[in-house]
Image: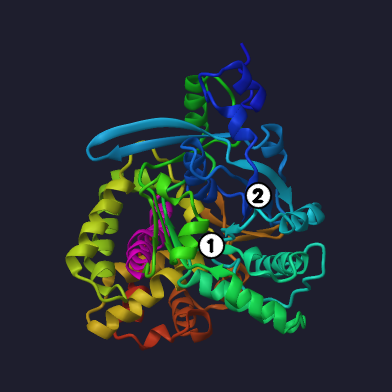
Amino acid sequence: MSLPQLSPELLDQRPDLLPDHTKLLALPEKIIQFGTGVLLRGLPDFFVNKANLQGIFNGRIVVVKSTNTGGTDAFSEQTNVFSHSIRGIENGNQIDDIVINTAISRTLAAANSWAEILECARNPEIKIAISNTTEVGIQLVDDDISATPPTSFPGKLTAYLYERFKTFHGSAESGMVIVPTELIVGNGDKLRDIVFEQAERHNLGKAFTEWLEFSNEFCNSLVDRIVPGKPDAETVSELTERQGFKDDILIVSEVYSLWAIQGGEKVSSVLSFAPADKGVVIAPNIDLFRELKLRLLNGTHTLASGLSYLHGLDTVREAMENQETSDYIAGVMLKELAPAIPYELNLSVAEEFGNTVLDRFRNPFIRHQLIDITVQYTAKMKMRNIPTLLSHYEKTDAVPELFAKGFAAFLQFMKPILHKDGGFYGDRNGQLYPIRCDSAAYFDEKWKNAASPLDLAHQVLEDAALWGADLTLLPGFEDAVKENMTVPLITE
């Protein structure tokens, strides 16, 4: 018997799934979100949906697909309703819940629905903008904000805000709260600076820049929840049978959740969904949350992903079940990264957080694909790990051997053997894997021209333009990386 597709019509037929769905689907649009990824759907959209269920926020989200790859068909076919499987351990208890999320009202592709997106700027109720366009999304480029659409995310946002400014004649009430969730330090500050620069480059006028400055809030934020990419076939099959319907855009996440947002009273007032869940924290300073998460969880992910993948493992859970890689992950996190976090904090706080992260990595329900963690590998290494490495050497000249091992694995992972259809591919025991990184062409050239893997390591480490520092100047680090370049990582 063929199972039905998740949709509002199915909710009509099965009121047990979501009793108040008719009311929820009729809520007005209050948020514009740049990005369709699982992280946004598994965290901000989860909080908004939870608030709607509690009758707190009472608003829905217009989602903008900014990239040119893929489409919005899967969302449209389900009228943007999706299921969210939440699985893991909390306070010693096993959690295995399914939530039907109705927070998204529409999903629009920027490439062909730009006029509709600008129409959202004219909606006085849409006072919140959220984004996740990966670490490389918040970049200043030579953009044209009059294009349909502009190329970059900051260009799109500038055009959107300018349209709103013109529509409401620069009124203070028309300002927005803008919360990027990209995993870069000071994401709100950086996005604000780029929007101001775009406004200046396009001569949008003093009145507009004053409105940007005094009527809008660009909030630094960080998100912390493991939400793997598309679930594997086994998980999809299990959840489909259990739920009694098909869902082509279902997501799976761990139980733990944190969205720390830097802001004051105004931000709290606009983000009125926050009280629905303790995982939303609005505070004047979020540096501690950011550093712990960025350096220990994300930093460990980055250092261990290539190494574990080249050991023949495919998921974080498999890496934690393998003695060698599990020891590496715990060691690099607690012995090298925690003491070197570039932020003043008690080491016991970092170790407590690190042990929580290790428990999350061991979650038996999450199949977090290592290959997904390697997306934009170079940018992640630079942003998440290099500051910690430099901080380590400010405190001691002891060589961080485990960090060097992870860095060497990164270099080996970034060795393309095939360039096809615009993409680069590496090799793991005869199995091609995608190198989805903007620096893939750089590494392709370096590997082709290097006299040896050791020469390659030297050239990359000394590239201050790539890392922001010449890493060959760090005592013993180059030698440690080179030593690991001679060790075969790929499981035979």
Dot 1 amino acid type? Val
Looking at this view, is 113 or 277 the one in front? 277
In the image, taking residue 76 as reference, residue 33 lies left or right, namely: left
Residue most extreme to the bottom: 473
Magenta residues (range): 287-312
Which residue lies at the image location 82% right of the left edge and 62% below the top edge? Answer: 148
Residue 268 higher or lower than 318, as above or below: below
In the image, taking residue 226 as reference, residue 118 lies left or right, namely: right
Residue 4, which numbered label? none
The residue under label 2 is 63
- Measured from the top left, where is residue 455 in percent x and y? 46, 80
- Measured from the top left, where is residue 340 in percent x and y? 27, 74
The secondary element bearing badge 1 is classed as strand
Which residue lies at the image location 39% right of the left edge and 85% below the top edge? Answer: 472
Which residue lies at the image location 51% right of the left edge and 60% below the top edge? Answer: 181
- Measured from the top left, where is residue 117 in percent x and y? 75, 55
Q: Which image quadrant for residue 291?
A: bottom left
Looking at this view, is 131 or 307 the one in front? 131
- Asked if residue 308 is among those painted magenta in the image, a careful observer would answer yes
Residue 179, which numbered label? 1
